[in-house]
Amino acid sequence: MSFAVIQTGGKQYKVKASDILKIEKLKNNKPASKIEFNEVLAYGDDKTLEIGSPLVKGAKVEAELMENSKNRTILIFKKRRRQNSRRKNGHRQQYSLIKIKKIFAKDGALLSEAKKVEKKETKKKEDKK
């Protein structure tokens, strides 16, 4: 099973083909658009491992943007006792939900690809027989 370590939004993620990730929001992208991550720190499989210094040049990971949204509200409540002073604030962090499609090696070879999901037929056809 091939994997890659990518860097985006100041964080590092270990990804495999067909993984779904929640990452920092990517700007100016619409759902179902293709995204390329060129900041690949390492990639490999069970037998081999390629580590960059700091990046592996030529390696890339392709993904598909599923949606841009916001997380649940986090409440920030500050209170100073016996001062009759309190402050309540809320924050909703924005994120992008992506699905990893392909992982490419530094020479451009395809390491792994997400499997396409086929929809199952309904049971109505089987029931009629």
Image (cartoon, helix red, strand yellow):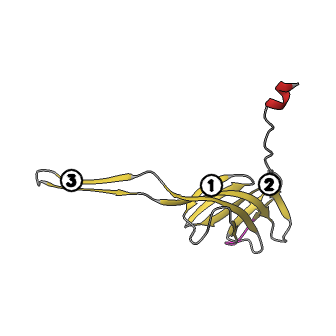
Q: CA distance from mark 3 to mark 2?
A: 51 Å
Q: Nearer the viewer, residue 37 or 120?
A: 120
Which residue shows up at 78% across the image and 53% down it?
Answer: 114
Q: Earlier in the sequence, mark 3 or mark 2?
A: 2
Q: Quadrant of residue 106?
A: bottom right
Q: In x, y percent, where is residue 4? A: 72, 60
Q: Earlier in the sequence, mark 2 or mark 1?
A: 1
Residue 66 in the figure: left or right of residue 56 = left
> Label 1: which residue?
21
Which residue shows up at 85% across the image and 71% down it?
Answer: 107
Q: Are marks 3 and 1 in contact (CB under 8 Å)?
A: no
Q: Nearer the viewer, mark 3 or mark 2?
A: 3
Q: Nearer the viewer, residue 29 or 36?
A: 29
Tell me the SS state at disc 2: loop
Q: In x, y percent, where is residue 18? A: 73, 52
Find the magenta span and give its range: 51-55
The tag on residue 45 is 2
The tag on residue 79 is 3
Which residue shows up at 12% across the image and 53% down it?
Answer: 84
**Main structural element of the magenta stretch: helix, strand or loop?**
loop
Q: Is residue 52 magenta?
A: yes
Q: CA distance from mark 2 to mark 1?
A: 20 Å
Which residue shows up at 58% across the image and 72% down it?
Answer: 28
Q: Nearer the viewer, mark 2 or mark 1?
A: 1
Residue type at the position of mark 3: Lys
Q: In x, y percent, where is residue 87? A: 23, 57
